[in-house]
Image (cartoon, rainbow, N blue to C red):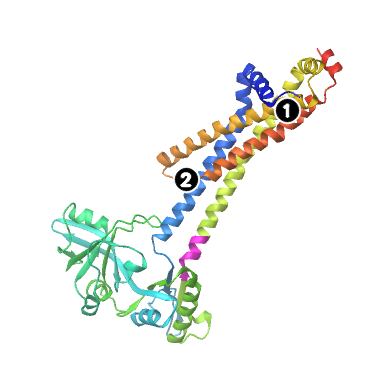
Amino acid sequence: MIAPSAILGIARKSLRTNKMRSLLTALGIIIGVAAVVAMFAIGTGANKKVAEHISSMGSNLLIVRSGSTTSGGQRMGMGATPSLTFADAEAIQKECPAVALADPSASGAVQVVYGNMNWSTRSEGTNGGLLAIQEWPLGAGRNFTDSDIRSSAKVCILGQTVVTNLFGDEDPVGKTIRVKKVPVTVVGVLKKKGNNAMGQDQDDTLLLPITTAQKRIYGSRFQGRVNMIRVKAASEAEIAAASEQITALLNQRHRIRTAEDADFSVMNLTEIMEAAKASTQALSLLLAAVASISLLVGGIGIMNIMLVSVTERTREIGIRMAVGAKTADILFQFLAEAIILSLLGGILGIALGAGASVLISRYAGWSAVISPFSIILAFGFSAAIGIFFGYYPASKAAKLDPIEALRYE
């Protein structure tokens, strides 16, 4: 039997003899592998981006929202009237063992002015727990104190976008701005956080003590009531327990008898994140499946060309058999040619797919992450295709009758 190194040498020489045909044969594999690598990179990047956006809102996060209420026998729409109170938030934090923090929230749009600069932004009232719940550290200054909340102090914390548009490079801490014509002192600046899952700039925000927001800024007619309470569970394992405890507590406090009568809802952002990740993963698998079709087409192309090669080289095969080549030698020679074509196509396809992923990420603005798994999968797939689609032509060549092969014209 001929040594493997000699078989590989013969296979390489045969492929070099028809360079253009070899390249065109491998083209299907190149495109298929490149498509698989690029699609997996885009899918992985999308999953990572979704996770980053949702985690930027805080880990172990639950959102309690006002639901529909009944007034004068009329059923009001969801959130039409604030049904949650400051006391509800305090009770959730104190009486629910699985809850670490609870923070009532009141939000609205405001115009802020500093000197001759002004900026329209989103403001939010908080009791100070928002920063811990959303894991949002301060870049400078301090958080709100209990005294600020009790006295409805005219103080605020600014996001980086507001700081940039009002102050430029000037330090805003200690400066006084006007929020809806109300003078407010800046006591803190948030670190940059970026966009959320909906693409909104989270840094374009202004935080106020919730009592200040309701009494001095918004002029709310529902003093002490809010549409939303953010809740941070004690741990990821206790999110479900926290949701059940909050529901049971608010049912008791609001005298809710049936689920249909509930004037609140509890949302688990972890479940939303998992659903979003599952959707992007399903899309990634679909794209990869579509891309893998071109790999199959490439494999069929290899088989067709190898069959043509066997026909063209029938006399050569007969001569080799006549001088002592075994059936296995002929089989492994043609199989080696098919595998070399596939592996060469796989290497070039990986390079092309990686380059395409970088270009897509840079110029299309899509997040793309090239994972070792996708490279191993694509390379393994290309090798498997070389073996699978190359075996039949190789087997056909090995089974040729030497005498008939020598007579072939």
- Quadrant of residue 89 in the image? bottom left
Circle 1 residues within 10 Å: few <14, some 14–19, many ≥20: many
Outermost residue on the left side: it is: 115
Q: Which residues are magenta?
A: 267-274
Residues at marks 1 and 2, CA–CA distance in whole angstroms: 38 Å
- Quadrant of residue 6 in the image? top right
For the residue labelled by badge 2, is the local secondary structure a helix, a strand or a loop? loop
| Label 1 sits on residue | 332
Residue 197 appears anywhere in the view: no
How far across and down, in percent of the image, does residue 154 sit? 19, 72
Residue 186 falls within the magenta-colored stretch: no
Direction from residue 286 to residue 131 in the image, left or right: left
Label drawn at residue 369:
2
Specify which label sits upstream in the sequence, 1 or 2: 1
Q: Nearer the viewer, residue 92 or 183?
A: 92
The structure residue drawn at horizontal position 59% and vertical position 48%, both measured from the top left corner, is: 286
The structure residue drawn at horizontal position 21% and vertical position 62%, both measured from the top left corner, is: 112
How far across and down, in percent of the image, does residue 231 sit? 40, 72
